[in-house]
Image (cartoon, helix red, strand yellow):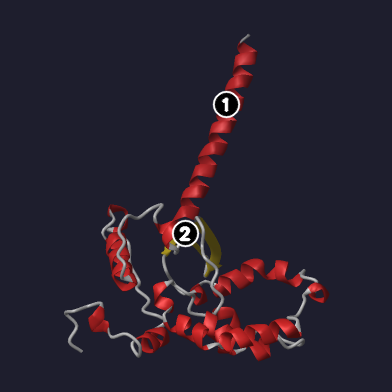
Amino acid sequence: MFCCRSEEYKEQNRINKEIEKQLKRDKKDARRELKLLLLALGNMIILPNNVRAYGEAIKEIDYETVTTMEPQHVVAIKSLWDDPGIKECYDRRREYQLTDSAKYYLDNLDRISQSDYLPTLQDILRVRVPTTGIVEYLFDLDSIIFRMVDVGGQRSERRKWIHCFESNRMEESKALFRTIITYPWFQESSVILFLNKKDLLEEKVLYSHLVDYFPEYDG
């Protein structure tokens, strides 16, 4: 009986030591890990990490099976894009949230529809893929582990975790940023604000003045 209990004690002691070792390793790894929350950032921020993460999968694509656009489809799309009514709809895109990359791809349709077409860096950066739910990206840099957490940037996704919206999208962005930086969990966290897409702002102010949305603006 004593021998059996002694063996059982040894086994429990061994397991406890293994658990302690693992906890120490986890604690050490946690010190090397930095968590970054990505919210409403341009895809260019995470593009290099996506390329590394999915590089192997991309290499396995059978390029022979990738089809090109049919000539009749190209003609139809160009005719539609040249239609005055469609142009008018595009000028009012702010009313229905058309992606900012639509014009870029439609203007470059002749090049994109070529049989030997290869995406340029700008073509890739212009791709807009909505984030659904929560996505994590892990990468190492100088022995430090970065865990980038990308939360949904679309309104339907934001409703899952934020309850502050306005009809003015700039006001919405400001409210969203204000909400994030006032969360108790982020009080000790550093915040980096990227004011990107300057070109889109310059394009939009040609059609609608800032004073229409911010009456206090006197610029």
Residue for point 29% across, 60% down: 179
Q: Is residue 95 left or right of residue 124?
A: left
Q: Amino acid at mark 1?
A: Gln
Q: Which residue is mark 1?
A: 12
Whether residue 99 is visible here, answered yes or no, is yes
Kindly state the secondary structure of the residue where label 1 is placed: helix
Q: Quadrant of the N terminus?
A: top right
Q: CA distance from mark 1 to mark 2?
A: 31 Å
Residue for point 35% across, 55% down: 162
Q: Which residue is mark 2?
A: 33
Q: Amino acid at mark 2?
A: Glu
Residue for point 44% across, 61% down: 34
Please rate how many residues cluster around mark 1, counting C-alpha atoms within 10 Å: few if below 14, some from 14 to 19, many from 20: few
User: Exactly how many numbered labels are in the figure?
Assistant: 2
Front residue of 8 and 93 = 93
Whether residue 122 is visible here, answered yes or no, is no
